[in-house]
Image (spheres, rainbow, N blue to C red):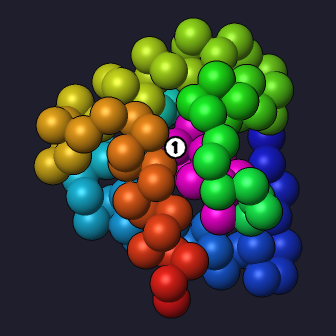
Amino acid sequence: MIYITGIGNAIEKRISQELIEEGILPNLDGYHYLLAAIKFVVESSDKLLSMKIINKFVALEYDTIPSRVERSTRHAKSKSKLEHLTNSEIIALIAEKVRLE
């Protein structure tokens, strides 16, 4: 589980707002995995992270396996306005929106 205080909390709140605006529901595991993945990308100095690395990081944070992270995020986006985008496109899009603010 991710525990965040201070400025990180503001980033998490902004990411959460974006996910909810796009129709990704907070009651799904995929929402929480996307939140963690986007936060990881926003805070990373490396702008070209592969989904393999991102999913592995999130899986470690939530004590699960990368394939479950991938499946859950796909399920969460399938119920949203972003269903036509890939997981990596969603993460990159929202991370860039947050970075630009």
Q: Indicate the quadrant where residue 65 lies.
A: top right
Q: Relative to residue 62, is residue 34 depicted above or below?
A: below
From the image, tell me which residue sits under label 1.
34
- In the image, taking residue 72 as reference, residue 62 lies left or right, namely right
Q: Relative to residue 90, is residue 58 depicted above or below?
A: above
Res 76 seen here: no
Locate the N terminus by quadrant. Answer: top right
Q: Residue furthest bottom?
A: 101
- Report the front residue among 40 and 79: 40
Residue at x 51%, y 89% (from the top left corner): 101
Q: Relative to residue 74, is residue 13 depicted above or below?
A: below
- In the image, taking residue 56 as reference, residue 50 lies left or right, namely left
- Report the front residue among 60 and 42: 42
Q: Position of residue 46 (x, y in %)?
A: 74, 55
Within-10-Å neighbours for mark 1: few <14, some 14–19, many 20+: many
What residue range appears in magenta? 33-42
Q: How many marks?
A: 1
Q: Main secondary structure of the magenta part?
A: helix
Q: Position of residue 31 (x, y in %)?
A: 46, 42
- In the image, taking residue 63 as reference, residue 96 lies left or right, namely left
- Report the front residue among 30 and 56: 56
Q: Indicate the quadrant where residue 17 lies.
A: bottom left
Amino acid at circle 1: Leu
Res 42 seen here: yes
Q: Position of residue 62 (x, y in %)?
A: 75, 29
Q: Position of residue 99 (x, y in %)?
A: 56, 77
Residue at x 56%, y 22% (from the top left corner): 69
- In the image, taking residue 100 as reference, residue 49 lies left or right, namely right
Residue at x 22%, y 30% (from the top left corner): 78
Residue at x 21%, y 46% (from the top left corner): 82
Secondary element at image label 1: helix
Residue 34: within the magenta?
A: yes
